[in-house]
Image: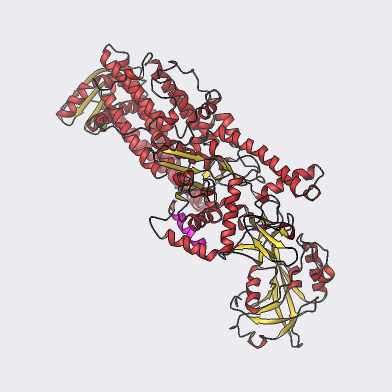
């Protein structure tokens, strides 16, 4: 393909560059997996965003990393599947839909289940379109022909398959347990849906009277309203204070129920009084103690957080109103004898904000121990394990799996996968199956739905048409290659995908899992609505473009670390893109009329050509090395230095000599090198900056429809010249040293100078002689002397580089008499400062009375002034020689 134009627009405009480009990629199906058997498959499934709202900056970071990986692999010749999809997000979406209904004066109970679900699907369609628009803005190379949703038919079939099989294997059961309960939404919550906040509460100290009237036993609680459900008091069996009371009874205040004193190893003898109240229906630890001692479970609350009939006279009261009332009553009765402030972590529902209640409820559970054990066995096998990047997060995963608890999977919602269980209307028999019982009129399906994480746990294989294990999609693209996700959901999603995949496919769900941190604000604070410090990625794109945002996100931290969002760094990336844009304009203006067939770098390469091609090979190696480790920050920084320093600041300037010279062969070679290096730069940058690299690449004399499917750069050892690289480094060092000396003595580049270079050996001598035109041009010399032995000019400035010494006669740089006069003034000024500080520090009144910090500051000034004065003195003596 010949280039369509020769000149880029004068200024980089991200809006213009990005407009319409994504649609071009989609229309040409560049992102669709091909099933080409000659290519190795590479699969990334997108962590499905919730259809609850628009994407935030954390999603932008997550998907940018995925897109970098998949774009790179596509260019490296893999058959890439980057599979898009979204999560129904049960409780979160239902809460949003119910809030919208409330604004309209409606509720789900009035609508009924079917109509409510229709409204929920309408919501899903609306917000799915928003999410797709944002994916487009971000430039994600997704295969939309395979897009999935956790509630679509295929994934629902997989969910039912898993539930039924686990039930048949005895790994799913129904029973009573203490779960996280949201009284506002009236549903169970998973651990991840509970946000713990430190709240200043109270410890209430009470005396429970012994039944025999011989005294009392002290207990303390943060939730006095739950005492209405107490069924025992527990002490440690080895606690000598209470051994004589074990087996006796106390009378529960207010209620009057007689409850046992039991001995249990769980009790901490050193904490408080060493005796604790046991409320099996309202505390998970008490539940376990209750099981060990066969205690009754007395539930004293309704699902909405109000007190029930077991609460006696407090029936109907809100739990917190009950707390106030019962505290007063206990004080009046002389039972509650002390209240002390107590900071403790209180769980709140992530969705509703309600204080979560540990609550006894009949729910469906997964028996986790066997599943966890199998997954841990696989993790111990090098060929079966999931590779965590960074490795330290494997420890996080293993610790959680070692201490796993059974998983409550039922939710009291309508939006989600309805549990495939039916109850016989007469006998109460339970039937579990993928389809309803044949005589369905006699059966009632469970009203609850499954935890969102239950379907999300199947995402890597359910999206690829499992349970059809003969399906060619499943067999080609599973296991997936890399998962990218945050460290905050290792427990709740990554772990569950691993054990479900192991159990149902006997394979790991992905080879690698790349873990990143959280995006924080400039001060390191977590972004939140309450702080008002959130950043909308679409706002960043509108101002600086998607490429600037993506490059900043990809290079802003090391793997596993948090990222601080800084507008200044995004702007810095925008400046980098402008640098690339301007360099590309230069290349294009000087390669007008070239086609791909004209590119020939084989003849008459000068040292700058050889050097930049060598540096290009080194850059390709480094970028490949760091990206294979998922260290995009290091890869990006290496690219940045090569592009900004080597290519733009040095090679382009040096290329102007042959380009504007008379040697047509040298000119043609340099033009070819310019095009080739820019082409390779754009390809390596493309995964980071897809839009601008595609735009510029389309102007180059190249072959191919799009940079998205162009070949990834490879090292060409025939274009590596280590000796040329060494010599070029010496040339650059000499030029930099000369410029530094000019700056030091305030001599402008426009003023010609005399330059003397003494080299260490004849080889270096000949190399510098051969390339002296670079020194003449970039040092702006009047006289240039290069030799192995020179007469060092008197009164000269000097510098040392590898293999050479540089001398610049001062007479050619400055007016010595004027410089001496200036330095004399500077010397006298510094002497006065030294004398002033000496006088201050010799005054005992100042030294003894002033704060130590102030005295230390004066001493530091004294030393600084003395050192500066000495340097000025040395400089004056040199000039007087």
Of 465 and 526, nearer the camera is 465
Res 743 visible: no
Q: Please, which residue is most extreme toward the right here? A: 313
| Left or right relative to 195: residue 548 | left
| Left or right relative to 863: residue 662 | left
Task: Specify the quadrant that holds the N terminus.
Answer: top left
**Residue in the image at 64% along x and 62% along y:** 364
Task: Specify the quadrant that holds the C terminus.
Answer: top left
**Which quarter of the picture shows residue 811?**
top left
**Vertically, is 266 above or below 177?**
below
Q: Please, which residue is most extreme toward the top here? A: 662
- Confirm whether the magenta stretch covers residue 126: no
**Which quarter of the picture shows residue 874?**
top left
Q: Which residues are magenta?
A: 388-411
Q: Please, which residue is most extreme toward the front here? A: 438
**Residue in the image at 48% along x and 28% along y:** 575
**Vertically, is 559 above or below 243?**
above
Q: How many marks?
A: 0
Res 680 visible: yes
Of 661 and 155, nearer the camera is 155
- Confirm whether the magenta stretch covers residue 410: yes
Residue 870 is situated, as x and y percent measured from the top left of the image, at 34, 37
**Vertically, is 102 above or below 451?**
above
Residue 193 is situated, as x and y percent measured from the top left of the image, at 63, 54
**Residue in the image at 44% along x and 31% along y:** 686
């Amino acid at each position: 393909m010949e280039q369509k134009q020769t000149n880029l627009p004068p200024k980089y405009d991200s809006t213009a560059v990005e407009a319409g480009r994504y649609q071009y990629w989609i229309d040409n199906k560049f992102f669709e997996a091909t099933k080409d058997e000659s290519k190795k498959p590479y699969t990334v499934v997108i962590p499905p965003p919730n259809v609850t709202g628009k994407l935030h900056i954390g999603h932008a970071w997550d998907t940018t990393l995925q897109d970098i990986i998949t774009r790179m692999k596509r260019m490296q010749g893999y058959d890439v599947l980057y599979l898009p999809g979204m999560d129904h997000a049960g409780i979160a979406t239902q809460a949003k839909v119910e809030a919208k209904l409330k604004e309209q004066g409606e509720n789900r109970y009035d609508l009924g289940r079917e109509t409510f679900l229709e409204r929920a699907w309408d919501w899903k369609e609306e917000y799915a379109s928003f999410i797709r628009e944002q994916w487009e803005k971000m430039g994600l190379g997704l295969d939309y022909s395979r897009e999935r949703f956790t509630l679509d038919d295929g994934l629902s079939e997989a969910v039912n398959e898993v539930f039924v099989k686990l039930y048949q294997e005895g790994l799913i059961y129904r029973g009573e347990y203490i779960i996280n309960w949201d009284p506002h939404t009236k549903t169970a919550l998973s651990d991840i849906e509970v946000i713990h906040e430190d709240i200043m509460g109270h410890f209430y100290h009470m005396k429970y009277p012994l039944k025999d009237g011989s005294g009392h036993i002290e207990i303390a609680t943060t939730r006095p309203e739950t005492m209405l459900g107490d069924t025992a008091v527990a002490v440690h069996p080895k606690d000598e204070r209470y051994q004589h009371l074990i087996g006796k009874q106390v009378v529960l205040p207010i209620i009057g129920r007689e409850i046992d004193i039991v001995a249990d190893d769980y009790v901490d003898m050193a904490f408080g009084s060493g005796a604790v109240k046991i409320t099996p229906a309202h505390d998970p630890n008490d539940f376990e103690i209750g099981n060990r001692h066969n205690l009754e479970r007395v539930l004293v609350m309704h699902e909405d957080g109000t007190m029930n009939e077991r609460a006696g006279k407090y029936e109907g009261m809100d739990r917190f109103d009950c707390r106030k009332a019962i505290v007063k009553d206990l004080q009046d009765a002389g039972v509650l004898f002390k209240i002390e402030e107590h900071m403790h972590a209180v769980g709140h529902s992530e969705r509703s904000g309600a204080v979560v209640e540990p609550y006894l409820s009949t729910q469906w559970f997964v028996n986790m121990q066997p599943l966890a054990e199998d997954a841990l066995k696989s993790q111990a096998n090098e060929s079966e394990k999931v590779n965590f990047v960074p490795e330290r997060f494997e420890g996080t995963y293993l610790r959680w799996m070692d201490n796993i608890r059974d998983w409550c999977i039922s939710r009291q919602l309508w939006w989600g996968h309805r549990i495939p269980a039916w109850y016989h209307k007469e006998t109460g028999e339970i039937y579990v199956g993928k389809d309803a019982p044949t005589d369905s009129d006699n059966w009632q399906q469970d009203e609850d739905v499954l935890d969102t994480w239950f379907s999300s746990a199947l995402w890597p294989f359910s999206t690829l048409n499992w349970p059809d294990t003969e399906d060619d999609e499943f067999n080609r693209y599973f296991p997936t290659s890399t998962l990218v996700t945050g460290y905050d959901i290792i427990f709740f999603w990554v772990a569950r995908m691993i054990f479900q995949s192991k159990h149902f496919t006997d394979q790991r769900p992905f080879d690698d899992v790349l873990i990143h941190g959280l995006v924080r604000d400039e001060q390191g604070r977590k972004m939140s609505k309450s702080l008002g410090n959130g950043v909308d990625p679409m706002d960043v794109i509108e101002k600086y473009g998607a490429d600037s945002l993506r490059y900043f996100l990809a290079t802003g931290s090391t793997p596993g670390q948090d990222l601080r969002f800084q507008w200044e760094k995004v702007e810095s990336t925008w400046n980098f893109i402008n640098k690339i844009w301007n360099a590309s304009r230069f290349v294009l203006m000087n390669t007008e009329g070239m086609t791909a067939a004209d590119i020939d770098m084989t003849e008459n390469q000068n040292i700058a050509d050889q050097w930049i091609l060598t540096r290009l090979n080194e850059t390709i190696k480094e970028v490949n090395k760091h990206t294979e480790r998922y260290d995009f920050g290091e890869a990006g920084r290496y690219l940045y230095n090569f592009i900004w320093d080597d290519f733009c600041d040095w090679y382009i300037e040096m290329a102007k000599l042959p380009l504007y010279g008379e040697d047509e062969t040298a000119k043609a070679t340099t033009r070819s090198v310019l095009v080739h290096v820019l082409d390779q730069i754009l390809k390596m940058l493309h995964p980071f900056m897809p839009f601008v690299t595609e735009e510029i690449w389309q102007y180059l004399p190249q072959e191919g429809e799009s940079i998205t499917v162009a070949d990834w750069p490879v090292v060409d050892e025939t274009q590596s010249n280590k000796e040329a690289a060494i010599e070029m480094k010496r040339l650059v060092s000499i030029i930099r040293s000369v410029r530094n000396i000019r700056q030091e003595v305030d001599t402008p580049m426009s003023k010609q100078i005399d330059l003397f270079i003494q080299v260490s050996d004849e080889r270096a001598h000949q190399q510098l002689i051969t390339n002296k035109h670079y020194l003449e041009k970039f040092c702006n010399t009047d006289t240039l002397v290069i030799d192995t032995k020179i007469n060092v000019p008197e009164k000269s400035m000097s510098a040392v580089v590898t293999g050479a010494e540089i001398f610049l006669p001062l007479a050619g740089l400055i007016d010595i008499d004027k410089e001496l006069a200036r330095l004399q003034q500077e010397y006298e000024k510094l002497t006065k400062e030294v004398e002033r500080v000496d006088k201050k520090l010799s005054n005992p009144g100042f030294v003894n009375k002033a704060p130590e910090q102030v005295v230390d500051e004066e001493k530091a000034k004294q030393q600084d002034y003395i050192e500066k004065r000495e340097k000025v003195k040395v400089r004056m003596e040199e000039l007087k020689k």
